[in-house]
Amino acid sequence: MHKQEYILVMKEIRRIAIANRGEVAVRIIKACEELGLETVLLHSDVDRGSRAYRMANTPICIGGAASSESYLNIQNNIQGALAGGADAIHPGFGFLSENADFAEACAKAGLVFIGPSAKSIRLLGDKISCKKLAQRAGLPLVPGYEGDDQSIKTLLSEIEKIGLPVIIKAAAGGGGRGMKLVRTMSEAQSQIESAQRESLAAFGSDKIFIEKYLDQAKHIEFQIFGDSSGHVQHLFDRECSVQRRHQKIIEEATSPSLTDDLRRQMGEMAASIGMLAQYQGAGTVEFLLQDGKFYLLEVNTRLQVEHPVTEEVMGVDLVKMQLQTAQGKFIFPKNFSNRPQGHSIECRVYAEDPYKNGMPSTGLLGTVSWPEGPRRRFEFGFEKGDTITSFYDPMIAKVIVWDQNRTAAIQKMIQVLQDSVVFGVHTNIPYLTAILSHPEFINGTMTTRFIEQYFPNGISLDPKKLTERKDIAKKAWQLHKKEKLTMNSPISKIDSPWLSYWRGV
Amino acid sequence: MKSEIIGKTFWIKLDGETWSTDLSELDEQYKSANKKKAASADQILAPMPGKITKINIKNGTPVKVGDVLIVMEAMKMEYTLKSELNAHVAELKVTTNQQVTLGELLIKLTPT
């Protein structure tokens, strides 16, 4: 019998639909432009005021503001992509990016889903089957409950068996949504119910699972990438221990916490899970590290928010690699041996009031200016005149820096954040600089409990400072009026050197 | 220094810090136009714009200090609004899934 030959019929990809919004949509559009690909932006009706809308070749409105009517609606995305003449869909992260049904629906409609196969997403993306796969591969797991019996009674008794503290997670989740910490049995039931509601709202399923909470752990993750030939390679590690309510705030590459030996072991394991799942495209294997031991946390079958720090230290473009892999054109060179160079940090800029414990802040954006410079990178989706709404994630931008070493990168990041201007919504920039200046962060010894331990109530403003700010505002306002600027427009502005007189008032 | 008026708010950036002040605090002419409802323990106002996702009470329900009255969602995060009073619900002004604006009156309580 002849050896079976496969003739791979790759559909030529010329036009990409982007099933996402904000900064990641912009990131994907830029990569498409560099590869000479056209773009179709699938957006909700409130996202016309956004950078991605202005940049895409063909914006197509696929529904209302609520994610369930637009960004989470499989049929609307497919119909929009077909109407726009797209050959493929890039799902970005969040929304439908880890939804195997979406990947399948794309294939049925003749669209290439830019990401792993539906089968790989199911194997790895569903945390429960991922754990089964990891167990077969002999990977260390955190003790927990992942059963189908989701009654409150069973969940409560499982919590007692595992032992407090435990963490409750959305089975279909990611990015911290629906995650709840339980420290006492008295709060267990309300935390379970809250997790179920958030999970249902964010992912369309209220299935949860429970895990022992490691209270001195570091969050370390490995970027993996499966090329067009089926080879899976890891691209080293990131540390994302700075998290609030289980949502990452600051990420860096590489981790300051790994020995060469741990880095090698974890990296090899990350790549091998990818191989077992026949992984294609960009993915991330997340670990918890405590007392020199590591445990598999989950595998995210998509591009991560924090992918730029890997790109900066590895000198790669992960989004272009994703697009080229979908085209059947990306294969790692045989001697691929890139090593991470220098250090990179990413800060997520959230629209929230840092002095009100992170209360969401929405509104019309005025001046937004990012201080350009060598190895400073700004990923943002909204500009002056755009409105930040309450419908979606509060992340309005990412600031990424690279420098020779970690100390220099921290110093650079603080400077860059202080020189950034965002008017119209409050941002967490003061909170970010407080974290970056904290001795535990500077030493690199922070754990996932860092925020809870050192910033349990966010940051506060000295009352003296508050009075001072009001005084400056009053004086600046008088000058502002004197400049007789037009007040007809909803936004008016002065940027006068005379106002520097008020420095140090 | 940079400054800018956006809507009814004056924004300032100075020495690496950004803050905003309501124009009503800076100028008489904005005072009447920008009158805010006073938050008080017997008037529960929306602390942010967002969606009402769960309502635990009805008109007339007795509540104690710390009871969760309403759960809201904005920017994909849940926030719970609790009672600061022992009271009963005099008026519930919203329904589940309703979008509310910042400062909107949600519940009136009558202290007991």
Image: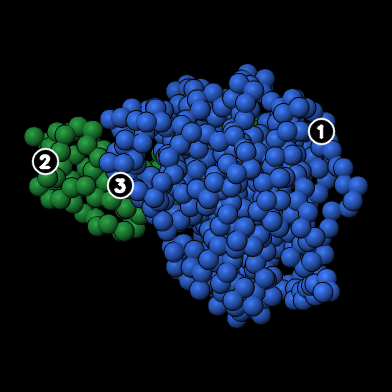
Q: Quadrant of residue A155?
A: top left
Chain for mark 1? A
Q: Which chain is green?
A: B
Chain for mark 3? A
Q: Which residue is mark 1?
A: A342
**Residue A23 placement, left or right of A15:** left
Front in this rendered view, residue A504 or A51: A51
Q: Position of residue A256 (x, y in %)?
A: 71, 27
Is disc 1 in contact with disc 3, using a CB cutoff of under 8 Å? Answer: no
Q: Name the amino acid type tagged 2.
A: Pro
Q: Name the amino acid type tagged 3.
A: Ser
Label 2 to label 3, Cα distance in Å? Answer: 29 Å
Front in this rendered view, residue A293 or A432: A293
Q: Which residue is mark 3?
A: A151
Q: Position of residue A85 (x, y in %)?
A: 66, 80
**Residue A160 placement, left or right of A50:** left
**In the displayed structure, would residue B16 be above or below residue A124?**
above
